[in-house]
Image: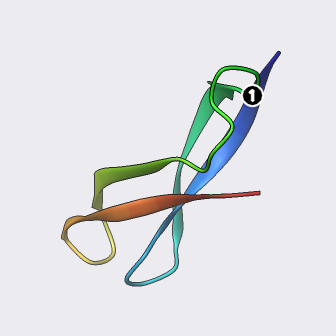
Amino acid sequence: MREIITLECSDCKNRNYSKTKNKKKQQDRLELKKFCRHCRHHTVHKEVK
């Protein structure tokens, strides 16, 4: 039941990371603070389809 999702930078809108998550256990959208290569600092990355 794991599904592949992509994470998008909230500042520059680039899709930098891909990750898997369990759709049954975690219903809401994922938000992680990760390093963005384009911005060159840590920003919040949000889940997009």
Q: Pick the residue in front: 28 or 41.
A: 28
Residue 38: % across, % down:
33, 75
Q: Quadrant of residue 20?
A: top right
Above or below residue 24? Residue 44 is below
Above or below residue 4? Residue 15 is below
Q: Residues within 10 Å of mark 1 (few under 14, many from 20)?
A: few
Above or below residue 38? Residue 43 is above
Residue 35: % across, % down:
26, 56
Residue 47: % across, % down:
59, 55
Q: Which residue is mark 1?
A: 23
Q: Pick the residue in front: 38 or 47.
A: 47
What scheme was used to colour the molecule? rainbow
Residue that appears at 75% across and 28% down: 23
Left or right position of 25 against 7? right
Q: Quadrant of residue 43?
A: bottom left
Kind of residue sitting beneath label 1: Lys
Above or below residue 3? Residue 15 is below
Q: Secondary structure at mark 1?
A: loop
Quarter of the image with the N terminus in it: top right
Left or right position of 46 against 49? left
Q: Farthest bottom residue?
A: 12
